[in-house]
Image (tube, rainbow, N blue to C red):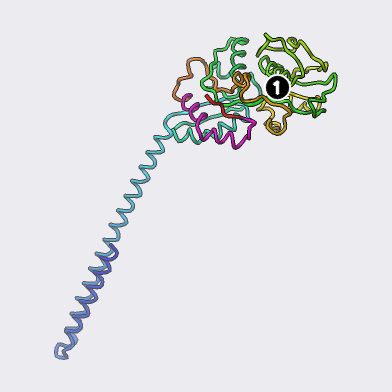
Amino acid sequence: MKKKALSLITAALLTAGLLAGCGSDAAQGTGAESAASAESTAVAETAAAEAESVQESAAAETGASETEAAESDAAETQAVESKGTITVAATSVPHAEILAAAAPLLAEQGWTLEVTEFTDYIMPNEVVESDEIDANYFQHITYLESFNEERGTHLVSAGSIHYEPLGIYPGKQSDLAAITDGAEIAVPNDTTNEARALLLLQEQGLITLNADAGINATVNDITDNPHNISFIELAAEQIPRSLPDFDFAVINGNYALQAGLNASTDALAVETSDSEAVQKYVNVVAVKEGNENSEGIQALVSVLKSDEIRQYIEDTYQGSVVPFEG
């Protein structure tokens, strides 16, 4: 368009030059020169006007294109934002961190993820049972089943996401093989995690449990305790900060991470991935029964089991949190 305007102006100048040349005869004099000059000016003005019109047309076309593009982007954004919000209750580490990594992936599908963090194991279940929050992500399946039985709730798993190897951590002592008689070991006081801790201690040869106790084992099921170990039962979240007070402590993976401990590097012994216990202690997304197949919950579970989140878990936690296969 600019070339067209330039051509019009050039044409005007050439015309002006020709007219000036024709007026060289002295007999025609000043009148001819004036006529030529007037005609030249008129042509130039016409060319300039046409060039300005062309430029205005081009600007208008560009503006229209930009407006159309903006409207298209707005429509696309509106479509992405239209699905709604998924609310999730979680403990901070690693669950809330994993959810934070999942949020952008859910946003790409049109879902807003809203996470409320809790520091205990009771409230996250209660707010889901009461329909205040859509789902929670903080507990393993065995704890969920035990919670339902003890409190009459109606919670179910919508998907298995990861497991956190339970670990035995050093406190006043650092060598399990040289444990002293009468040593004190802190263990979680909730039913399932206490059994899990005792099973791990049994695997290390420190105690023997009643063969029928299984995942319901308590300190009362210990049939052999050659080192006369004293077991101190505490709320799971209190154990990491009390670690210096005990010879050893068995700590849940999420609370260990919160305290700056890593099962793969700091623990003296951990649950192995092929153990029966791990299958029973996989961490799940829990919902109130009847909501497990809702669109938002299915989207959440799918993203949490995606290759992107699997890679995030492996890179971030280096074996202290492990993606669940299945």
Reply above or below: 315 against 88.
Answer: below
Front in this rendered view, residue 209 or 313: 209
Which of these two is toward me, 264 or 67? 264
The reply, left or right, for residue 227 in relation to residue 60 is right
* Extreme residue in the left direction: 27
Q: State the image coordinates of residue 250 (x, y, percent, origin top left).
A: 73, 23
- Residue type, mark 1 in image: Ala
| Residue 302 falls within the magenta-colored stretch | yes
Q: Which residues are magenta?
A: 297-321
Residue toward you, 41 or 72: 72
Q: Quadrant of the N terminus?
A: bottom left
Specify few, some or many for label 1: CA neighbours under 10 Å numbering under 14, 14-19, or 20 or more: many
Specify whether residue 247 is painted magenta.
Answer: no
Q: Which residue is mark 1?
A: 236
Q: Residue 119: image x %, image y %?
A: 66, 25
Quadrant of the image occupied by residue 324: top right
For the point 64% across and 20% down, the residue is 121
What residue lies at 24% left-to-right and 76% top-to-bottom? 13
Helix, strand or loop: magenta stretch: helix
Q: Horizontal and vertical percent for residue 239?
A: 74, 24
Front-most of 310 and 104?
A: 310
Vertical comparison of 249 with 52: above or below: above
**Which residue sits furthest bottom?**
26
SS state under label 1 = helix
